[in-house]
Image (tube, helix red, strand yellow):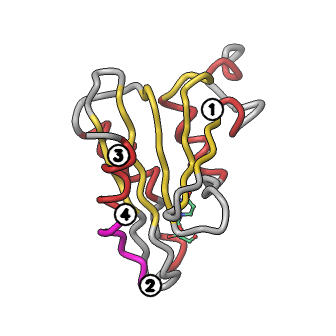
Amino acid sequence: MSLLTAAMTVRENAYVPYSRFKVGAAIRATSGKVHVGCNVENAAYPEGTCAEAGAIAAMIAAGDTRIAEVLVIADCPAPVPPCGGCRQKLAEFGAGDVKVTLCTTDGQALTTTIADLLPGAFTTAHMDSV
Ligand code: THU
């Protein structure tokens, strides 16, 4: 299945009673398997989780650990930008040159990379002196 179809399909399951803003994310792992996630909100607002975080959790639960490609989709005036926390989460599991495609439900798409989304990412290398 294409990442676009996978992300569009899972987006329909988003639990968004507070924002009404449905997001779908699909990750192709280096194994070739596709893992999906949608945003899941909570009455205690900070406990909500983003679509990207859900897709990463599904990937890890399925036994994959490395991201080969990512696609995120939302009903947005411009390609949906991942939040700061999700940029850090993507950087944990994907190389800087991993392609990230940000989409709108009306057909816009912006292709970027994990490194471009999070310049100067904090990594384990920054703890080498510890
Ligand atoms: N959201 C995502 O799931 N991913 C993004 O890339 C941007 C924001 C969610 C979080 C929240 O449920 C809703 O969109 C509004 O912020």
Q: Is residue 13 magenta?
A: yes
Spatial CA distance of label 1 from label 3 is 20 Å
In the image, residue 33 above or below residue 53: above
Q: Main secondary structure of the magenta part?
A: loop
User: Which residue, as the protein is rendered here, is positioned at the far left?
Assistant: 62
Instruction: Check disc 4 and report its element: helix, strand or loop.
Output: helix
Q: Amino acid type of disc 1?
A: Thr
State the residue position of label 2.
Answer: 43
Spatial CA distance of label 4 from label 2 is 20 Å
Instruction: Check disc 2 and report its element: helix, strand or loop.
Output: loop
Give the side of residue 79 with respect to residue 106, left or right.
right
Depth-wise, is mark 4 or mark 2 nearer the camera? 4
Residue 78: % across, % down: 67, 61
Q: Which mark is residue 11?
A: 4
The quarter of the picture where residue 69 lies is: top left
State the residue position of label 3.
Answer: 57
Q: Amino acid type of disc 4?
A: Arg
Residue 29: % across, % down: 35, 29
User: Viewer-proximal residue, 35 or 106?
Assistant: 106
At x 49%, y 51%, the residue is: 72
State the residue position of label 1.
Answer: 113
Magenta residues (range): 12-17
Spatial CA distance of label 2 from label 1 is 33 Å
